Image: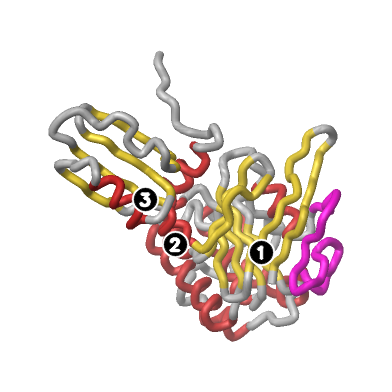
Amino acid sequence: MIEVQNLTKSFGKNKVLTDLNISVGKASVYGLLGPNGAGKTTLIKHLTGLYRQDHGTVTIDNKPVYENPEVKAQMIYIPDDLYFFSQYSIDETAKFYSQIYPEWDWHRYEQLKQVFPIDSKRRVVKLSKGMQKQVAFWLGICAMPRVMVLDEPVDGLDPVMRKKVWNLVLQDVAERQLSVLVSSHNLRELEDVCDHVGILYNGRIVVERELDDLKSDIHKFQLAFSNEIPEGFLEDEQVLHKTRMGSILLLIARGDRDELLQKVKLVNPVILDVLPLTLEEIFIYELGGMGYDIQNILI
């Protein structure tokens, strides 16, 4: 569905994206992760046709996105910083959307008034940020898009409304094969909705995998020893993180779980726990190996 191949973009002498490749399939939710300044916003503006790439291709269904009204008519982009016409009510904005999006569904618009309890005659710009976000999803879902690009999409929504919004989006993913790319710093929330994850760092995708596969490849062990921790323990393995507190050792390691367990058991720890990893921990330890780790700060 969404294909980005060898995308390169520079602003003057500053190269922001370098030979970047991502792929988002139909009926999929792709989580785009990365630290501030990694190039996420620049990538999103290429996906939505706002920027023209210096090199490479950005396509949806094998059609270029840039300056292509046909492709954009099947795409909804909901940024963190929303824009609405200053004089338009929700109903007037909906009428404007219906003239742009050929699949606009008025019946769905009326139905969703039960989900988004906002007077549709109110001017959108007079609403709070959270209510404007609700309007953006209300209109975006009624446009019946084939692709949704979301940038910090539920920031400002209360927990109940966040759940409602994601339920509506995921319903379209399942029933209409909607493709969603979402960028957010709320990794706990992404963990619940994404099936694929890409980690962007310094303008390159450094990890791109199914979320379940990503979790199956990195493991967290908590060990306790009756004496000193054995010298050279697991030094030949790919250890992403190691924290030592007396005789207790916390390890994050990459590799086959059973093989790592066998090597851990050889040193006879008094306690051996295999703990679940969150997406946030995977993000931290993946980037930690590239110099973006957490350092002790002394003041």
Query: Closer to the N terminus: mark 1 or mark 3?
Result: 1
- Give the quarter of the image for residue 93: bottom right
Q: Which residues are magenta?
A: 51-71
236 relative to 94 in the view: left or right: left
Q: The N terminus appears in which quarter of the rendering?
A: bottom right
Q: Look at the numbered disc 1 and give the secondary structure of its residue.
A: strand
How far apart are labels 1 and 3 at the CA level?
Answer: 26 Å
* Residue 97 seen from this side: yes
> Residue 214 or 257: which is nearer the viewer?
257
What residue appears at the point 55 percent right and 66 percent down from the top-left corner?
A: 29
Residue 49 screen position, x and y as percent: 78, 59
Question: Eyeballing the image, is 114 above or below 129?
Answer: below
Residue 258 screen position, x and y as percent: 33, 57
From the image, tell me which residue sits under label 3. 219
Residue 66 screen position, x and y as percent: 83, 61
Circle 1 packing at 10 Å, graded few (<14), some (14-19), many (20+), is some
From the image, tell me which residue sits under label 2. 162
Task: Look at the image and say whether residue 250 sits in the magenta stretch.
Answer: no
> Residue 10 or 186: which is nearer the viewer?
10
